Image (tube, coloured by chain):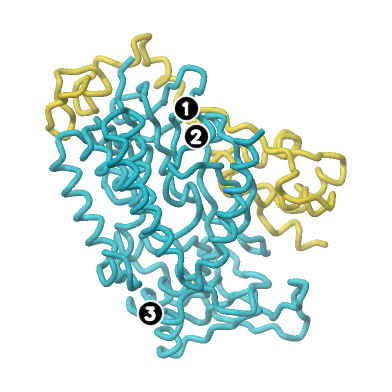
Amino acid sequence: MSDENTIIVCRCEDVTLGEIRKAIREGATTLDEVKRITRAGMGPCQGRTCRLLVAGEIARYHRKHVSEVLQSRYRPPVKPVKMGDFAALSEEGGNSQEEGGHRQATGGDGQCICGKAVTGK
Amino acid sequence: MKTTELAIVGAGPAGVCAALEAASCGVKVTLIDREEQIGGQLVKQTHKFFGWHEKSAGTRGIVISGDLADQVKANPDICFMGSAEALGYFQDDGVLLLETPVGIQKLKPERLLIATGASEKMILFPGNDLPGVYGAGAVQTLMNVHGVRPGKSVLMIGSGNIGLIVSYQLAQAGVKVAAVVEALPNIGGYAVHASKIRRLGIPIYTRHSIKEAYGTACVEGAIIWQLDDNWQGIAGTEKQLDVDVICLATGLTPLCEFLWQAGAEMAYIPELGGFVPLYDENMETTVEGVYVAGDAACIEEASTAMAEGRLAGLAIAYSLGKVPADEFSRKRAESLKELDELRAGPTSGAIVKGLAVMKEQMRKRVSQ
């Protein structure tokens, strides 16, 4: 069906229904396999939109229930992050910047960004 | 590594109510949201809440979120971390990774509540990536938060409460709603909302779906058609609509990424919106110390999300030794009763059935 190639399943990576179905016909049986072959689910939203649609296609082709389709892992980070931001993360888990930010979490002067004193542990 | 007694991911109705409840028992709470504002989807909800039981019935969502935000700000035991997006949860060491305006931070909470809500489901049709195809959430954000009309004429797909309410709001904003289509034989949402848009002359086509969207650089029109009993389009029933916006209100699915990462046991239960975590009467998942509330647990309404949030907040406070056992039992019973009452209506039938399936799986797991 030519329509397949004008239907987008993964908007982030521009993967069409035709491409997903081709991967499944050629032997992909899990979300990870379809992902590695087509890149569906590898974009900024990390599959939030297409994951269920791809699982549905695999289930339909193999006459399985969606729950029986092997899901892929949800590895952190759940969205793209700059390498530099990770590099700036110190061993102590905080950083020294003081302009804004949550000081309860960053280990500041006992005051939170919202202006409240942090009386916690 | 910084710590907190309770970290809540998501400051929507469930997360905020959990924060307020837990803090009222003396728990130190860190409430995290990727938005700057407190309230989650409530800030887009300019309509009055419907219902007979809810304390919030007759109140607009945005008013409720403003009220909740005031309570959070006034509470010395809750720190709200806005513009902070959770990136991951590392189950081995119980650390939450956050992207904040001042860089990436790590937070180790004693208890974790996932109240991340839902993401929208998309449907497949030719032309579904044309500019002008929106999710209903985006249309609400444009109109109700930013005061921008999405276009001149809209085809609404889906007649659940979101589809009906957004159609009405579009009409109020002076946008033509060409039609509402619904794949099921019946309108999904409340009759009160459907009646409102029918009175405006907006047609609702049940057993219909979109065949295709067309246009060169953006949506210029859509073709809808009738469906047979196998959900296939019937040739010859096509109707052409001049629309520049196609709005998808085709359902939500729980956003559970951090629960998967935590290693919580999940089950696929369509009545609840897709993959959902198994959880007990305290809203605790199969991972000790990790809780869930709101749409992340089961796609429902803001009123149930708030009640689940309060229940989770109470249970977390009890688990931290902040509430005496007798008080906890009494308050939990009240909370569970409130949830039962919220789910007593005929439109909650599928939810009640789905929750029974979830509870049965949880029971089997415990008895193993």
Chain of the residue displaying label 2 = B
Whether residue B341 is situated above or below residue B287 in the rendered picture: below
Number of residue marks: 3
Left or right of A106, for residue B181: right
Quadrant assignment for the N terminus of chain B: top left
Drawing shade for chain A: yellow
Left or right of A103, for residue B308: right
Tags 3 and 2 on a common chain = yes
State the image quarter where residue B130 is shown.
Answer: bottom right
Q: Residue at x 36, y 39 (%)?
A: B315
> Which sits earlier in the primary sequence, circle 1 or circle 3?
1
Question: In the rendering, which numbered label is found on residue B258?
Answer: 2
Camera-side residue: B323 or A22? B323
Whether residue B116 is situated above or below residue B2 in the rendered picture: below
**Mark 3: which secondary structure?**
helix
Q: CA distance from mark 3 to mark 2?
A: 38 Å
Tag 2: residue type? Phe
The residue pinned by badge 3 equals B171
Quadrant assignment for the C terminus of chain B: top right
Q: Position of residue B307 (x, y in %)?
A: 35, 53
**Mark 2: which secondary structure?**
helix
Drawing shade for chain B: cyan
Tag 3: residue type? Ala
Question: In the rendering, which numbered label is found on residue B28?
Answer: none
Disc 3 vs disc 2: Cβ atoms closer than 8 Å? no
Tag 1: residue type? Tyr
**Mark 1: which secondary structure?**
strand
The residue pinned by badge 1 equals B89
